[in-house]
Image (cartoon, helix red, strand yellow):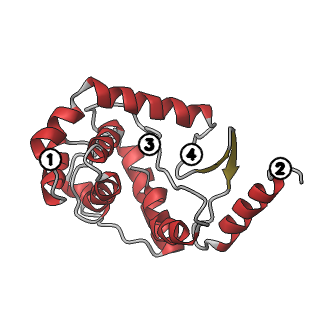
Amino acid sequence: MCSWCWGYKPTIEKLKQQLPGVIQFEYVVGGLAPDTNLPMPPEMQQKIEQIWKQIESQLGTKFNYDFWTLCTPVRSTYQSCRAVIAAGFQDSYEQMLEAIQHAYYLRAMPPHEEATHLQLAREIGLNVQQFKNDIDGTLLEGVFQDQLSLAKSLGVNSYPSLVLQINSAYFPIEVDYVSTENTLKLIRERIIDNMPAQ
C-alpha cells in the first residue's frame, strides 16, 4: 500500500504489455508496515499526505484526501498483503491489488481493516467464505512470509521495486515513474549482457 506504487500503476501496466514474451511478470508483496491497530501519529499522517500531493503534482495521480478525515489512519499494510495473496488463491491477485488501491486512494476506505477486504472480495466476485478462511490460514501466512523473505533477500527496501531474474541471478531495475522506454532498455541490456557466449 505504498503511495508511489499507486503513482506507478499506469506506467507498470504499460510496461507489462510491452515486455518481451519471454519475460514472465510476477508480483511479490514486500510487507512495508507490520501489523498494528495503533493510529498513525499526526506527523506521519501529514508526511504521507504531503507525499500524496507530491505524487499528484509530479505524476498526475488522483487521491481522495477525505481519507484523512473520514478514517483513522493506521500504518499497517500486512493485512492488505494477505488479502492480495488470499485473492490470488482464487486467481484474482491483481484484481484485489487494484481494488485495495482504489479503496484506499480513491474511495477513502481503511486499507488495513478486514471489513474493507471482505467488501472488496464480494465486489470482485470472490468466494468470500473461502477468502476469509484463507486469509486466516497457515498456508497463506507461509506464502506471505516466503514473499517477505524473498523481497528481503533481493535487497528490496523501497517500493515499488523491479527485479529482473535471469536464470538464478537477480538484477535490480531502476523504476522510471513516467516512461517505459528506459526500463525496457535496461531490461534488454541485462538480458544481452547475460546471454551465454556463442
Give the quadrant of the C terminus: bottom right
Q: Earlier in the sequence, mark 1 or mark 4?
A: 1
**Amino acid type, callout 1:** Leu
Where does label 3 land, which residue? Answer: 29
Q: Earlier in the sequence, mark 1 or mark 3?
A: 3
Pick out the residue farthest to the top: 138
The disc label shown at residue 158, or none: 4
Where does label 1 land, which residue? Answer: 118
Dots 2, 4 in contact, CB < 8 A: no
Pick out the residue farthest to the left: 129
Q: Earlier in the sequence, mark 2 or mark 1?
A: 1
Q: Position of residue 93 (x, y in %)?
A: 33, 51
Look at the numbered disc 2 and give the secondary structure of its residue.
loop
Residue at 59%, 66% in the rendered image: 19
Distance from disc 2 to disc 4, alpha carbons, whole Å, reads 31 Å
Q: Earlier in the sequence, mark 3 or mark 4?
A: 3
Distance from disc 2 to disc 1, alpha carbons, whole Å, reads 48 Å
Label 3 neighbour load within 10 Å: few <14, some 14-19, many 20+: many
User: Considering only vertical position in the picture, is 3 above or below 34?
Assistant: below
Judge depth for marks 3 and 4 and give the one in front.
3
Where does label 2 land, which residue? Answer: 196
Distance from disc 3 to disc 4, alpha carbons, whole Å, reads 12 Å
